[in-house]
Amino acid sequence: MSRPRACVLLLSVMAALRLLPRLLPVSRTRLVRSHSAGAPVSVPARIAEKRRAALLGGGQARIDSQHKRGKLTARERILLLLDPDSFVEYDMFVEHRCADFGMESDQNKDFTVFGGSLSGAHAQKICKIMDQAVMVGAPVIGLNDSGGARIQEGVESLAGYADIFLRNVLCSGVVPQISLIMGPCAGGAVYSPALTDFTFMVKDTSYLFITGPDVVKSVTNEDVTQEQLGGAKTHTAVSGVAHRAFENDIDALLNLREFFNYLPLSNRDPAPVRKCHDPSNRLVPELDTVVPMESTKAYDMVDIVHSIVDEREFFEIMPSYARNMIVGFARMNGRTVGILGNQPKVASGCLDINSSVKGARFVRFCDAFNIPLITFVDVPGFLPGTAQEYGGIIRHGAKLLFAFAEATVPKITIITRKAYGGAYDVMSSKHLRGDVNYAWPTAEVAVMGAKGAVQIIFRGKETDAEAEYVNKFANPFPAAVRGFVDDIIEPSTTRIRICRDLEVLASKMQSNPWKKHANIPL
Ligand SMILES: *[C@@H]1O[C@H](CO)[C@@H](O)[C@H](O)[C@H]1NC(C)=O
Ligand SMILES: *[C@@H]1O[C@H](CO)[C@@H](O)[C@H](O)[C@H]1NC(C)=O
């Protein structure tokens, strides 16, 4: 039961792009002048001239300076990002009301009036295309590069921002929204990317912050550079605001293309399926020995994911943030899946605030867009300590639990090793409507690890108590006899089993009780 529809749709996709905001007024100034100075020009000639001027953007000098900074122009970016000849530009002729005012009183060349008034028209263009995107069910991609202009914010531009924010919120869960930050983005403008599903950044040339280094210095007396405050490294590794960072414009756009192929066009479409050359019945023999005998020894969950998914292709999301949890997109027998996994290599794969939030948001994206979830579990529990308790691990951990429980997409879980305590419940257990839950022979589904349990039960006195505990509890059988895991499988067969299950689950229908919306613990 393959579903080739999505492939065709992917080719005919329409993207709503936010263009360099400074393109229009500059070209327009020149246009109006040339037109008003000469003899009357015919309508077709005027159309042609305006198009030509718009295509030139800010002129060759500006194009050169953009290139010197290692950046591409908006048009070059579009060429790289989209399929050849697929970009149809709307609103090329939109001009700003205040710009007309500027031309009337020709002496008024104040950039602050001009630049500030710009946002109104810019925002209207964005809103118009977003409204259409929701109507036809097309993802919205924003390429954000303000060119470093410092816009004096008039009320009109505030209104413009809010108009966009509202669209971002209304689009959320209807069409995927992706922001690629390719230049500075500061002040209120940051909230549009923040409201979208994924924010990608270009290293060294993009910044996101609410208040820049100068204001920070005057208010908190902190010395900080733009890069430290809101560069790609900060947002991918510390704040968790951005989901990936790329080397340069070209790398970013090509990765965005690759990423886009994983997504359905809207919540009305199933997860895309594309032709797969990796056999669905491929055994992965190395998995039979991948989990170390000593249950305290680490291994790399990303390696396991690579070996199981189609062509070893895994598009990781937030790879530098909360690395104890891995999330990302891959394909199984051609069908997009969302992958989550505890990472035993980092903090033993325990759950904490950061990883819970990272995982929860990813689960909710997948659930909103019909992308099945595959969860690899090796979790010793929640990270103990005052930092976590004071930080609200109860509230934040609840997000992940909530997201998994609420999700109605196909959910397949593989317990590779530890599934201890409350963390066992949280990680897409059978009890949270997991559809198929597998355990590898190395799985230990238990209230806690043997050492801790023995200390509590026997106060560490009995020497052979630990072995007894392991024998009795720290294995997959107690869960399997109760049906909490559906099967104990040979690890090498994991890919085969998942591919089969996804076929069966493709027609899964499940719904939650009617509600206006749920109240996830934020
Ligand atoms: C960045 O894009 C948003 C829309 O996503 C837009 O509102 C904003 O004007 C852009 N940022 C700047 C600084 O121009
Ligand atoms: C969670 O993220 C914050 C902000 O980046 C960081 O300071 C903290 O160390 C992280 N916590 C853990 C347990 O990694």
Image (spheres, rainbow, N blue to C red):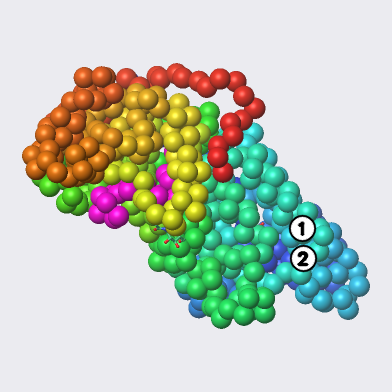
Percent coordinates x, y for residue 338 in the rendering: 38, 39
Q: Is residue 393 magenta?
A: no
In the rendered view, would you say 348 is above or below 402? below
The residue labelled by disc 1 is 158
- Confirm or deny contact between disc 1 and disc 2 (CB under 8 A): yes
- Which residue lies at the image location 69% right of the left edge and 49% below the top edge? 164
In the image, is 329 to the left or to the right of 56? Answer: left
Mark before the other along the chain sequence, 1 or 2: 2
- The reply to whether residue 6 is in sight is no
- The reply to whether residue 405 is in sight is yes
> Which numbered dot is residue 248?
none
The residue labelled by disc 2 is 153
Percent coordinates x, y for residue 245 in the rendering: 43, 61
Q: Secondary structure at mark 1?
A: helix
In three-dimensional space, the C-alpha distance between marks 1 and 2, rounded to whole angstroms, equals: 7 Å
Type of the residue with mark 1? Leu
- Segment colored magenta: 342-363
Q: Is residue 351 magenta?
A: yes
Q: Quadrant of residue 522?
A: top right
- Which residue lies at the image location 32% right of the left edge and 20% below the top edge? 504
Type of the residue with mark 2? Glu
Percent coordinates x, y for residue 410 in the rendering: 38, 27
